[in-house]
Amino acid sequence: MIGLGGNLGDPQSAFIHALERLAAEESFEVTAVSSLWRTPPWGVADQPDYLNACVRGKTMLSAQSLLQRLLEAELAQGRVRKKRWGPRNIDLDLLFFGAHSIDEEGLVLPHPRLAERAFVLLPLAEIAPDWCYREDTIRSLAEAADPSGLEKIAAPGEWWRPG
């Protein structure tokens, strides 16, 4: 499962192009897409609101290879890493890789701060409500999350239509 975020330029188009790129490379097949959400910034408050979504899919790649493809898709969309939690046009986060727990250089799965982030939990609950994160389901974590400032702005079929 992948989390998508961005708050500069046209993040929605960046999401679409990145997902199309992954599909064209046969790196990742999208099987479910959340709604598109407008969310307040997290970490660094003095920046524009974000758009966020989550996708679920299948891949034959390893977790490290998929992460590399996500980073390449970000670069292809013009992502420049300047400031942690700062503004960006696109951010693709690998949240889960099946039921695998991974702790390697540059990759920790499940995503270690997932349970702290309503902007990930609410979209993720739409596509994987019964998925377990530690001792809780995504649904229960989403229900406990503070939804302040989050707004669903487009249903899955309104922002993403697979090619």
Image: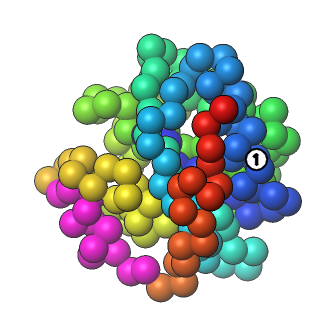
Whether residue 141 appears in magenta in the rendering, the answer is yes
Describe residue 149's horizontal placement relative to residue 82 as left or right.
left
Describe residue 133's horizontal placement relative to residue 30 as left or right.
left
Q: At x 54% / y 73%, what residue is drawn?
A: 152
Rendering coords of residue 71 (x, y %): 67, 32
Rendering coords of residue 101 (x, y %): 29, 32
Answer above or below: position of 113 versus 32: below
Assign the N terminus to one quadrant of the image. Answer: top left
- Farthest residue toward the bottom? 148
Q: At x 74% / y 64%, what residue is drawn?
A: 7
> How many numbered marks does the figure carry?
1
Tag 1: residue type? Ala
Quadrant of residue 102 in the image? top left
Q: Foreground: 14 or 135?
A: 14
User: Can residue 50 be seen in this snapshot?
Assistant: yes
Q: Secondary structure at mark 1?
A: helix
| Residue range (magenta) | 136-147
Q: Which residue is mark 1?
A: 14
Rendering coords of residue 40 (x, y %): 61, 77
The colour scheme applied to this rendered structure is rainbow
Assign the C terminus to one quadrant of the image. Answer: top right
Whether residue 144 appears in magenta in the rendering, the answer is yes
Rendering coords of residue 138 (x, y %): 27, 57
User: Can residue 117 be seen in this snapshot?
Assistant: no
Q: Foreground: 104 or 32?
A: 32
Q: At x 48% / y 15%, what residue is drawn?
A: 61
